[in-house]
Amino acid sequence: MPAILLTGGAGYIASHTAICLLEAGFEVLALDNFSNSQPQALERVAQICGRSIPFVQADIRDEAALEHVFNTHQISAVVHFAGLKAVGESTEKPLEYYDNNVAGTVTLCRVMARHGVKQLVFSSSATVYGDAQKMPICEDAPRSATNPYGQSKLMLEYILADLQASDPQWRIAVLRYFNPVGAHPSGLIGENPNGIPNNLMPFISQVAVGKRAKLSVFGDDYATPDGTGVRDYIHVMDLADGHVKALQYLQQQAGLVAVNLGTGQGYSVLQMVKAFSEINQVAVPYQIVARRPGDIGTCYADARLALQLFGWKAERDLADMVRDAWRWQQQNPDGYCS
Ligand code: NAD
Ligand code: UDP
């Protein structure tokens, strides 16, 4: 049976997606250069699924290595997660971001086309909506970007649309993720940030476990009910399931679709802190500090298109998100190196 190639397969979202794909009866092949992940993630996936996960260590920018992968494996579709994702770092190292994300994806698509593999699910982001004026955000909202990471996603959305328009055999699902959080309920895999976490949930978890003294809440003067930033947090297992549904959709439908994967529900930073500490019965000390440059006040999805096209909606609630994030953190205080 041909496999689904997961680029960035050892990463946070891909490792959870691998489980959902296997459970849905797909074969998977993971490819990663381990620039932001460890092979242990795939060993844990194997432990959860009771079977080994084939993987290749390679870089998506290495065309010869990709050629070899497509020559030696039967691949029916690609779910393309590989890329760099730290907004701050992208402003310091724009060329690395454009090279990894944009050039890497172009190389991948070129090799796919050569091998007649023209089904692609692509990891985009709600960041392509910039500072959206209308909530909830629909897929046809104006797009913009304010940093090289966001630019790279936006450019790729245009590149993939051009590619599909040039050759209607391509079937492409562009998935715009809102804020993925949480972990597999086993606590065996989860988010494993390098150094100081940029994102809210891993930061809260590290404060709760005692690795960091307190959370800095970036601004309490936004136009939101409690003044702190509002985001659409989505459980990573729901997000993972969205990829299975997107692939099943592409098996039936030609063309390109761009679809939000969010819950449609926004929570503020203080609501997240409160939920985490109350549900997990653990203290999360915090202080209010200045706004983080480049941050927006509110961002949440109109999630109806995913339901309409894929028959998918998020099933897990905030309690599941904070409980599963905490289980992973407690069992693995130092990530996969614990
Ligand atoms: P992650 O860093 O955990 O996973 C990305 C994986 O890609 C890592 O394992 C990394 O080693 C690998 N990788 C990076 N460059 C590569 C290259 N050139 N060749 C091969 N492998 C490479 O990140 P994630 O959170 O799982 O994100 C997956 C995708 O989803 C990314 O494209 C990211 O931009 C996108 N996304 C993530 C979020 C989020 O908040 N986590 C939100 C929106 C979109
Ligand atoms: N945030 C915060 N302290 C942190 C990290 C994040 O107050 O240490 C806030 C941030 O200002 C935003 C929300 O939490 O309002 C989500 O931030 P994150 O970086 O996780 O996601 P993004 O801003 O990319 O949507």
Image (cartoon, grey):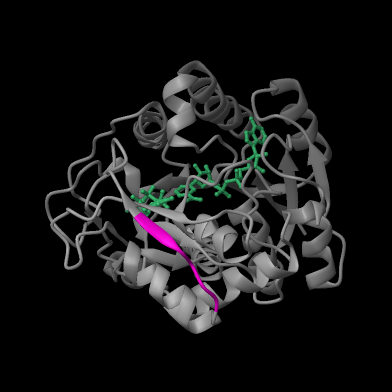
Is residue 288 rendered to the left or right of residue 226?
right
Q: Is residue 315 visible?
A: no
Is residue 8 rendered to the left or right of residue 176?
right
Q: Disc count in the image?
A: 0
Q: Quadrant of residue 269?
A: bottom left
Give the position of the N terminus as an image quadrant. Answer: bottom right
Above or below, comparing residue 224 to residue 76 in the picture: below
Residue at 25% in and 44% down? 129
Q: Quadrant of residue 234?
A: bottom left
Task: Give the residues in magenta.
Answer: 282-287
- Nearest the camera: 3 or 265? 265
Above or below, comparing residue 279 to residue 15 in the picture: below
The reply to whether the magenta stretch includes residue 168 is no
The reply to whether the magenta stretch includes residue 283 is yes
Question: Most prominent secondary structure in the magenta stretch?
Answer: loop
Residue at 57% in and 66% down? 208
Is residue 244 rendered to the left or right of residue 125?
right
Where is residue 44? Give x, y as percent.
Answer: 80, 62
- Nearest the camera: 234 or 199? 199
Residue at 39% in and 26% down? 148
Q: Is residue 84 visible?
A: yes
Where is residue 32? Give x, y as percent.
Answer: 72, 39
Where is residue 62? Give x, y as percent.
Answer: 70, 22
Is residue 281 rendered to the left or right of residue 3?
left
Give the position of the C terminus as an image quadrant. Answer: bottom right
Residue at 57% in and 43% down? 196
Where is residue 221? Give x, y as percent.
Answer: 17, 53
